[in-house]
Image (tube, helix red, strand yellow):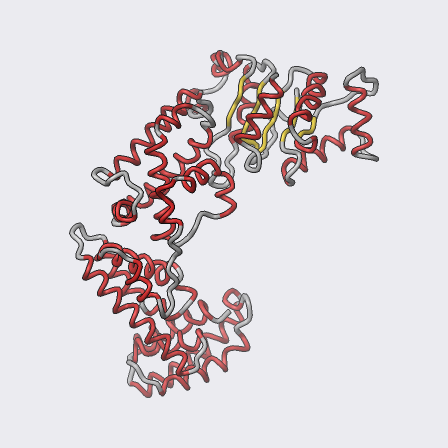
Amino acid sequence: MVAGDVAHHFKENLDGRFKAMVVAASRSACVLYKRELDRHLPPAYTQVVMSYVSEEEEPISGYKRVLSRVFPGKDPEGINKEIVARFKEEEFPKILVVTNMLLTGFDAPALQTLYLDKPLKEHRLLQAIARTNRPYTDVKEAGLIVDYVGVLKDLRRAFEIYAREDLQGVIEDMKHLREEFVSRLKGLKDMFRDVPVEYDREALLEAVERITVDEEVERKFVNGYRSLRRLFEMLGADEVKVEHLKDYGWLSAVYTYYLKEAVREGEDSEVARFFRKTIQFVHETMEMEELRELPPLEFDESYLRKLEERARSDREKAANILFTLNRLVLVDRSRNPIYESLVDRVEGLVKLWRQKIKNYKEIYQTGLQIVDSFHRLQERQRRLGLSDVEYGLLLALEDGLGEGEELAGEVRELYQEVSPWLIPGWVTQDSLRKRVEERVRSFMRKTKARYGLSMDEMNRLHRRLVKVLENYSV
């Protein structure tokens, strides 16, 4: 009966995301657990890790013979080591069944749930609990203990051997998880006072605007939602989730819309795998149908036309053009020298967005001007036939000298001269970096004489040109 419950809980809550450990009462119980779990799960899911003696009785002797066929040429110690290594590094096994081994000193971050079917005392109990609390990327809030024997009801003696501060947050029962879930949910909802709890684009955009006007608020929402989502997954089928499903679903929709419109990224597939309950819930919400059908706008020559066709309000136009430029210029600036040349203007646009009283038409018109500048710069690069690094050198020079197409030939010649040294890793190789900097310095001395630059102006442009080569040459 317990094995069936373990199998059901694992399939519903962990399979494909985390791993688990069953602590059985004895070595014989480990073998019996393996047999029962194999009735409910594929046999590859589980393996037993325990000690053996030379003369074993049933059911251990029979299981030992099976192991010798599955792991030919290995002794019991070697078999245990291989099972543990596979558990840590491979997909299978997904559940380890143990009784004494691995309860202390075992470190496997993917281990999330401990099914406890053996009385453990004092420090062994706390050590076993700690096995599930190892951090795992950004998807594991804490471990989960499923207690089948009632040992978690009396932790006083175990706690007495540790300082109180050492135990802070070591273990919480489901009651505390529920309370934390509700508290965090309320804290996030309070960020959206007066925002309609609706799934239409206007309501979700208003919510996203509320969190993107301040970097600290934005960070608080993102971190808070991700923490809330981890708790939602940990709570399994708890009824508290049903009670607060409407609010949680709406916050999930806001987060999804934020990723889609403001960040311009979907959830990382590896991360999404661990939050399938939330992902499934959000994507099954009928009100999100319209949003799912809206593909992100590509920043190409038809971007503005598509934006005009799709956007329903000045607010939506302003938000879209702001988030697009913010992503391209401020986030992806190292990919394209044209983006780098527009940084100051986009930062100014962000400041307009973060004003308490916004003029959406002004934001949109300012964004249009930046987009127009981008396309003109892009067309000029094509007309001059310059690579990204060459165009970056030209834009850096023109920033100090003024626009002049005669400089195009000069930067092309400079790049040809330094390109033999611009191999991967040249920035950290002193000899290559020195050659590049000396050649750029020689170029700038001639430029200084021709344009009557001061030493400070020459040095500033020298640094800019070297920086362009660092960013775009490899």
Q: Residue at x 35, y 63 (%)?
A: 329
Q: Is residue 195 above or below residue 239?
A: below
Name the one closer to the observer, 370 or 199.
Answer: 199
Q: Residue at x 39, y 22 (%)?
A: 176
Name the one closer to the observer, 137 or 325.
Answer: 325
Visible residue check, residue 179 = yes
- Image x and y of residue 8, in percent: 57, 25
- Image x and y of residue 287, in percent: 35, 42
Visible residue check, residue 215 = no
Displayed quadrant of residue 308: bottom left
* 223 horizontally vs 439: left or right: left
Displayed quadrant of residue 320: bottom left
* 400 horizontally vs 128: left or right: left
* 433 horizontally vs 50: left or right: left
* 216 horizontally vs 51: left or right: left
Displayed quadrant of residue 399: bottom left
- Image x and y of residue 451, in percent: 30, 85
